[in-house]
Image (spheres, rainbow, N blue to C red):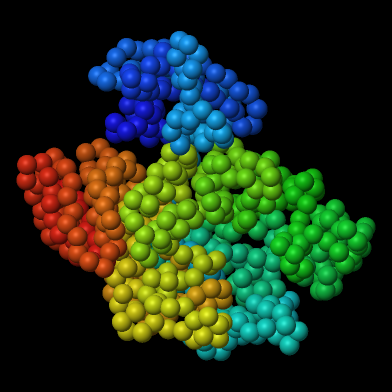
Amino acid sequence: MSEQFVFDSRCELCKAPYGAVTCAAAVTYHLRPLATEGFSHCSIIFREEFSGKTTQTELFRDGADGERIRFTGTVPAPQQPELVWYHFRFWREDGSGCLLDRSGYHSEGSVQEWQLTVYDDSAETPAWFGEGVTYQIFPDRFCRLETPKCDSLIGNRAIHENWDETPEWRPDPDGEIRCRDFFGGSLAGICSRLDDLAALGVTTLYLNPIFYSASNHRYNTADYRRIDPMLGTEDDFRTLCAEAHRRGMRVILDGVFNHTGSDSIYFNADGHFPELGAAQSQDSRYAGWYHFSHWPDQYDAWWGIRTLPAVEESNPDYRAFIAGGEDSVVRHWLNAGADGWRLDVADELPDDFISDIRTAVTQTKPDGLLLGEVWEDGSNKIAYSQRRKYLLGSETHGLMNYPFRTAALAWLQGGSALDFCEAMETIREHYPRPAFYAAMNFLGTHDTPRILSLLGSAAVPSDRDGRAHFRLSAEEYARGQALLKLAAVLLFAFPGSPTIFYGDEAGVQGFEDPFNRGTYPWGHEDDALRSWYRLLGKLRHERVSLRRGELRWLCVQGRAMAFLREVDGEQTVAVLNAGDEPTTVEFQWDGGALRDALSGTELTPVDGKLIFALAPRSSMLFANQ
């Protein structure tokens, strides 16, 4: 423990165990103020978020420790899942004293408390996801076996004859961007490329929505029971799952349960479906699924987008339809071969609804997985004025790790390694261990610009026409490629599932939606990048330490960092330099010789230290012999 700290919540000399704890776990605290402060008493003050309970427990004086006095106490965590906020109070015999919180000593003002996450661990988190490699596919843009027909389908669709064209981004004559241009990727197309994905080391396929919808992104569901005909049929889906399972892969579906499409069986604003929808009749079975302030033209919609009417998740019929019955949507597609669900806009789904979905998943498939889309620290997220409970044991197994992407991108674009380390240690301290190791880590998704474009471009065009046609120069591409290879090492070496957005490993470029949703460049991929990703996938498969090893930071300096993954004696060390200049890396190492699995370079420690030069925008991945 650094002597500047009286208490460090991340140091086991001060708090044990590290980070989040299970219900009723015994947590020991040690504080060491300077003796010259004259403190004779110390107490810890707990404030429970959900119960509203506040308690104060005095720690006992444990004697002198050099120039310091030691106060110690073991306090049980709450019996039920909780979010506990805590700080300390010191006082002297004359009654004078102060508080200690994350900002240091003070006697007045607001308190900056530490967080203790208390979770229920009675249900195990499936290990297959966090230990594996995930590949995210935007189904319309991955692989087309033939140009489909779309004449009889909702959406007034248009088909790109040329697979390599830029997605349509300009408004239609009514000024709307409707996303009705399709390229014709299919489930059979994905199935035809499973061997390519297996060679990449992929163990989980995450598919963006596949159900019948009017738009190419398919987030405006028209029928949860039907695969979009341009993608195929339920039999095609079952075949894809069976073929994926035969190769040791799992399949995760995108669950869009906060809203439907206005052009859907349920709302049926355009009258395309024979059954009466909520927008056609207040006697419709689905009328209670939506909230109308004035029927039928004024209704709640996701972010005010009228083509995405929001669903009343509290409606019993809707809940039963999605997760309750034996053949509910969640259960049906798990029985058809899916292995889990990712919940779109989890912030907008009530906690008890997420819990119902979790129950449906685990009852149907005991090793099934439930992930949530959350863009911030999901352990303490407030959404719509409510503190959320995603990770306390009854809801999601894990979350999309946007904080990882945010911190990694800041570091890659000029930030310090220390800031990245601090951001990740905050997540590691706050998240239950199973959730930290089941996080979906990524550098880009369908909702973010392509990582290669972000890392390579010297300047982003200010207008959409410029961004639509922008491509990196040779010099920019080389820089972006070097940084992407570095970022991929970080992605594959860090705890959680490294997730590849389709085509990132092939050199796909593009800024915001829809430019980030271009087609996979079959036949003109970046072979250097693909080979790099294949090597990382192979190492992730071969080295158990990369899949489930403990994390320990060895060196964090400037733009460079090194961390260790270790389990059962196997050690892997990732060393990374995002800077534009070479740097000398030095850290203690008593584990013998190391070999860089990326280049073959071997290093031997001298006097218990490794000291070596690391080139700009480069990385090494050392494996113990």
Residue 108 figure quarter: top right
User: Can you name the residue that lies furthest to the left here?
Assistant: 606
Residue at the location (13% across, 52% down)?
611
User: Can you name the residue that lies furthest to the top here?
Assistant: 93
Residue at the location (24% across, 55% down)?
575
- Residue toward you, 70 or 571: 70
| Residue 309 at x, y percent in the picture | 77, 62
| Residue 546 at x, y percent in the picture | 31, 49
**In the rendered view, does 585 fall on the left or right side of 411?**
left
- Residue toward you, 307 or 200: 307
Residue 571 figure quarter: top left
| Residue 603 at x, y percent in the picture | 10, 53
| Residue 381 at x, y percent in the picture | 58, 45
- The answer to whether residue 239 is seen in the rendering is no
Please identify the quadrant where the N terminus is shown. top left
Residue at the location (61% across, 32% down)?
49
Residue at the location (33% across, 20% down)?
36
- The answer to whether residue 315 is seen in the rendering is yes
Tell me: residue 150, above or below residue 56: below
